């Protein structure tokens, strides 16, 4: 079953995100869906043709994690945007953030600081089900530094395409806009 690109057109009009930026971003996302399907199909065919002991197979297999995560992380990202209400201060998420970081503010400071790091990638608030702890991770590009077995809660894209059209190099201004549009109830529903 091939993957199908989801439609996030309802996000157009979100404060702090221009239509041009969002439309470009949706097109990029659709490219990851297309390429995930292509890579999976090609690998499957190579496997059937007995071509697995080849450098082509090895390189494409390495590529799969990059394309797949490029697809899935964008879905998590778009789905955790479009919110209008603040975090529920008495909800499960707020409670867990306080347990792990001492306060909501300390968590947000660390999340923003992670997003301000030089480089391209993602900031992901992960829940470690083994300990219950919440940890902010930097994910390099799409595939490096995901913690095994953890559950992604809040995802922020900090590739330049996510903000440069609207903010140039002012990444902190983009992070402000991101926080104004977080869909906190979507994140609440991701908690295990
Ligand atoms: Fe992106």
Image (spheres, helix red, strand yellow):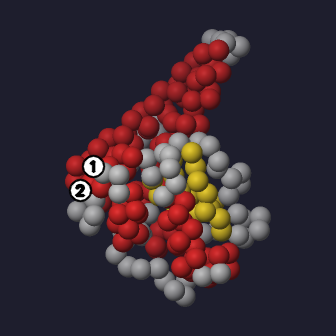
Residue at image location 59% in from the left, 37% down from the top: 65
Q: In which image quadrant can residue 137 be found?
A: bottom right
In the rendered image, residue 83, in percent from the top left (x then y), is placed at 37, 71
Q: 69 above or below 88? A: above
Q: Residue at x 67, y 12 (%)?
A: 54
Respond yes or no on whether mark 1 lies under 8 Å from ligand 1.
no
Q: Are marks 2 and 1 in contact (CB under 8 Å)?
A: yes
Residue furthest out toward the bottom: 90
Question: Can you say which quadrant of the picture contains the C terminus?
Answer: bottom right
Residue at image point 65% right, 48% down: 145
Question: So how many labels did they put on this image?
Answer: 2
Q: Is residue 50 left or right of residue 107?
A: right
Q: Residue at x 62, y 29 (%)?
A: 62
2 or 1: tag closer to the N-terminus: 2
The label on residue 22 is none
Local crowd size for mark 1, using a 10 Å CA cut-off: few (<14), some (14–19), many (≥20): some
Instruction: Specify the label residue 165 is tagged with.
Output: 1
Q: Is residue 75 left or right of residue 13?
A: right
Residue at which label 2 appears: 18
Left or right: residue 157 compared with residue 25 = right
Up the image or down, 97 lies above or below 17; here it is below
């Amino acid at each position: 079953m091939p993957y199908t690109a989801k439609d996030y057109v309802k996000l157009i009009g979100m404060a702090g995100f221009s239509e041009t930026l969002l439309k470009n971003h949706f097109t990029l996302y659709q490219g990851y869906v297309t390429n995930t399907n292509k890579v999976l199909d090609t690998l499957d065919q190579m496997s059937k043709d007995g071509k697995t002991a080849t450098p082509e197979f090895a390189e494409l297999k390495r590529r799969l994690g990059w394309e797949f995560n490029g697809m899935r992380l964008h879905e998590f990202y778009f789905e955790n945007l479009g919110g209008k209400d603040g975090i529920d201060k008495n909800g499960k998420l707020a409670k867990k953030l306080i347990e792990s970081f001492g306060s909501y503010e300390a968590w947000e400071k660390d999340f923003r600081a992670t997003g301000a790091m030089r480089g391209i990638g993602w900031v992901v608030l992960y829940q470690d089900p083994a300990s219950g702890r919440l940890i902010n991770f930097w994910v390099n590009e799409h595939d490096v530094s995901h913690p095994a077995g953890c559950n992604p809660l809040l995802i922020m894209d900090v590739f330049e395409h996510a903000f440069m059209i609207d903010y140039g190099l002012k990444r902190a201004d983009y992070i402000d806009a991101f926080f104004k549009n977080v869909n906190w109830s979507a994140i609440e529903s991701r908690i295990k």
